Each structure stands twice: as structure tokens, then as C-alpha cells.
Image: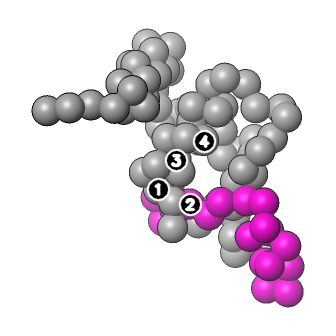
Amino acid sequence: MNYSLHDILNECFIFAVSKFKTMKKAIKEYLNKFGTCVNEIPVSELDVWVDDHKCIKWGSVEYFIPENNSFYTIEDEKIYDHLIKNYCI
């Protein structure tokens, strides 16, 4: 089985995060910090959010998360990549 560098780095990241805290907890912290629940946004504003955010569904909740954020740490960037790869809708 061939693995891409992205897959290997993603797996290494998941392992590293689990060493300090669970992935689920890391995602919850990330979403609390950067995510916005889709159902909290007025319908008239959705077009604006779609321009520079990705929509994910994590659990039963849909979130907009910013594509680029100057406040992202390396861990935040890896969580963003993981969410987009696995939960983007």
C-alpha cells in the first residue's frame, strides 16, 4: 500500500496530538476558537461566509471555519487540514 507524504504527516500529527490530548478534544477547542455554527448565521449573510470559509460537519453540527487565519498555530493548521480532508461538506 502506498501512502502519500500528506497521509504520513497527517498520521504523525494525529499521533502527536493524542500524546498530549485526544483528537476530539483538540477539534472541540479548535471549533470553539475558530468555528461558527452555520445555523447562527442569517441566511442573507451566507454568501459572504462561503467566500473565505469552508463548511464542515462535525458530529451533527455544521460549522464554517476560516480558510486562512493569521492566528493559526501549526497545530491549528493541522486540525484545519484534518477537518477539511475528513469532514468538509
Q: Distance between the residues labelled 2 and 4?
A: 10 Å
Separation (CA) of disc 4 from disc 1 = 10 Å
Q: What's the CA distance linking mark 3 and mark 1? A: 5 Å
Q: Do the residues labelled 3 and 2 touch (CB within 8 Å)?
A: yes
Most foreground residue, 43 or 66: 66
Q: Which residue bears the numbered disc 4?
A: 80
Q: Is residue 83 visible?
A: yes
Amino acid type at mark 2: Ile
Residue behind mark 1: 87
Tell me, yes or no, whether the highlighted magenta stretch contains residue 44: yes
Q: Do the residues labelled 1 and 2 touch (CB within 8 Å)?
A: yes
For the residue labelled by badge 2, is the local secondary structure a helix, a strand or a loop? strand
Distance (Cα) linking label 3 and label 2: 7 Å
- Label located before the other in sequence (2 or 4): 2
Residue 70 shown left or right of residue 26 in the figure: right
- Which residue: 66% across, 31% down? 76
Q: How far apart are marks 1 and 2 (CA)?
A: 5 Å
Residue range of the region highlighted in magenta in the rendering: 42-60
Q: Which residue is drawn at 66% across and 39% down?
A: 30
Rendered image quadrant of residue 69: top right
